[in-house]
């Protein structure tokens, strides 16, 4: 049976070689290997932490590896990475344990010779932690800052240009923190207050969100039993804000254009008291199956999933409310999807903004005369957010942006921009980075 560190190495291989999402890779290995909750938590910490700090980790390893690091076997490289991550960032793990466990894992997976190599590199790092060089010889100031925060230089320079140097630093610092995991209380099964009392009775410690039907437990696994009963589901609070901004009503016909994995569709259904019709689109059968499974677990039966390209989908009758949570760069959630920072390019930004605009154009075609459209992303790039909305409004003078203050209760107004949309940077108000705008036709 695989142990925590071996699963971490296998998951990192899936992320790097097969371009899997880190959480998808981890969930796969957790499903085939029985681990105690504390070991699962440790595995997640190693994987996500290694991905966040990969630039800095690789910089350190290269100081103690005298050959071509780029040509190193991927599993050996990841064994060294998770070992170095523990040495550099996990003070609670004894140095000898970080080294020895990595060496034994290398022997198991790659044999004695490479086990000896891992032993030599990690022991050198362990014995010289205080003298490790965290600077780039001959590098620019931007190079040094990018290394310090383990972010690609092009992203750093973009954020400095958009937000200024101090805010760019704040964004990167937030991206390197362990994100809080929020659980949405299923109001079809429990009133939020009643469920919170249940948690207190079971000595589960948690924090409240400004969203009254969300809780943030100190330990993820304390709420795991309630996932199986459908009393809660995992959802980003920023993503939930977009659903709140749409504000669907019971009995309405609602479209969720980019619905997987189902968190938005099911929240809309809960807000609608499971009364009405929700059409949820996605391109892939397996993702639609995920939505159906989640809806079933939560006791929701008003969601119809359809396999279709949302840029071409049409509906003769139209919809009362449309949620377009568009595919995006994800630069607002790099603490959760740390691998994205190493995959993204400026070319991706241009391609995605074109796709987003096509989706918004099609949403407008399917909206009834008095319908609302909420456009949202988990990006902090203007081209995917406010610039795109301005482009749409300039091309469609019959539409206007309705201020979120008119829709959301007072306690949410602190996250509303002066122009009326929701614009969050990572770490602000405890949320991920995100954008949401509500569009309605002019009277």
Image (spheres, rainbow, N blue to C red):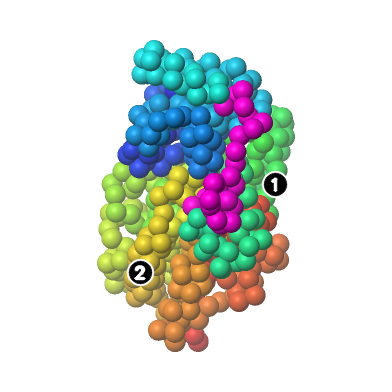
Residue, x 50% and y 43% (percent of image)? 55
User: Which residue in the structure is indicated by mark 2?
Assistant: 354
Q: Nearer the viewer, residue 271 or 31?
A: 31
For the record, the magenta segment spans 125-152
Residue at the front extreme, as displayed: 138
Q: Residues within 10 Å of mark 2 (few under 14, many from 20)?
A: few
Q: Residues within 10 Å of mark 1 (few under 14, many from 20)?
A: few
| Residue 142 highlighted magenta (yes or no) | yes
Between the C-alphas of marks 2 and 1, the distance is 38 Å
On the question of residue 328 being in view, the answer is yes
Residue at the top extreme, as displayed: 112
Residue 388 is left or right of residue 216, and the answer is left
Q: Nearer the viewer, residue 189 or 90?
A: 90
Q: Position of residue 164 (x, y in %)?
A: 62, 66
On the question of residue 409 being in view, the answer is no
User: Which residue in the structure is indicated by mark 1?
Assistant: 208
Residue, x 56% and y 77% (percent of image)? 402
Q: Is residue 330 above or below residue 30?
A: below
User: Which quadrant would the N terminus be assigned to in this image?
Assistant: top left
């Amino acid at each position: 049976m695989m142990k925590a560190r071996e699963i971490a190495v296998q998951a990192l291989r899936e992320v790097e070689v097969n371009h899997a999402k880190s959480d998808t890779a981890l969930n796969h290995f957790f499903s085939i290997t029985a681990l105690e909750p504390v070991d699962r938590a440790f595995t997640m910490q190693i994987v996500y932490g290694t991905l966040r700090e990969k630039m800095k980790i690789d910089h350190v390893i290269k100081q103690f590896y005298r050959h071509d690091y780029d040509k190193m076997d991927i599993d050996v490289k990841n064994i060294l990475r998770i070992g170095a991550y523990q040495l550099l960032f996990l003070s609670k793990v004894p140095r000898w344990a970080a080294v020895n466990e990595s060496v034994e894992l290398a022997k198991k997976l790659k044999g004695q010779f490479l086990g000896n190599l891992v032993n030599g590199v990690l022991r050198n790092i362990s014995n010289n932690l205080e003298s490790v060089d965290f600077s780039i010889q001959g590098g620019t100031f931007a190079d040094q800052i990018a290394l310090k925060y383990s972010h690609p230089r092009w992203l750093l320079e973009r954020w400095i240009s958009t937000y200024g140097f101090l805010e760019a630093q704040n964004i990167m610092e937030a991206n390197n923190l362990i994100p809080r995991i929020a659980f949405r209380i299923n109001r079809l099964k429990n009133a939020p207050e009643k469920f919170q009392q249940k948690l207190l009775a079971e000595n589960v410690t948690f924090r409240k969100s400004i969203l009254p039907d969300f809780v943030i437990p100190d330990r993820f696994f304390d709420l795991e039993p309630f996932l199986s009963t459908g009393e809660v589901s995992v959802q980003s609070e920023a993503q939930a804000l977009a659903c709140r901004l749409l504000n669907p009503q019971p009995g309405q016909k609602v479209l969720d254009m980019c619905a997987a994995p189902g968190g938005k569709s099911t929240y809309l259904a809960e807000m609608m008291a499971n009364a009405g019709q929700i059409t949820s689109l996605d391109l892939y059968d397996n993702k639609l199956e995920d939505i159906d499974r989640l809806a079933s677990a939560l006791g929701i039966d008003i969601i119809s999933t359809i396999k279709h390209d949302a840029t071409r989908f049409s509906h003769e009758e139209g919809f009362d409310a449309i949620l377009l949570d568009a595919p995006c760069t994800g630069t607002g959630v790099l603490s959760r999807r740390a691998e994205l920072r190493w995959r993204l390019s400026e070319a991706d930004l241009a391609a995605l903004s074109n796709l987003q605009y096509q989706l918004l154009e099609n949403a407008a075609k399917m909206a009834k005369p008095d319908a609302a459209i909420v456009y949202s992303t988990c990006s902090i790039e203007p081209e995917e957010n406010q610039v795109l909305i301005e482009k749409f409004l300039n091309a469609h003078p019959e539409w206007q942006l309705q201020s979120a203050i008119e829709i959301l209760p007072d306690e949410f107004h602190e996250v509303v921009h002066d122009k009326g949309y929701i614009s969050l940077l990572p770490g602000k108000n405890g949320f991920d980075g995100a954008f949401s705008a509500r569009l309605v036709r002019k009277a």
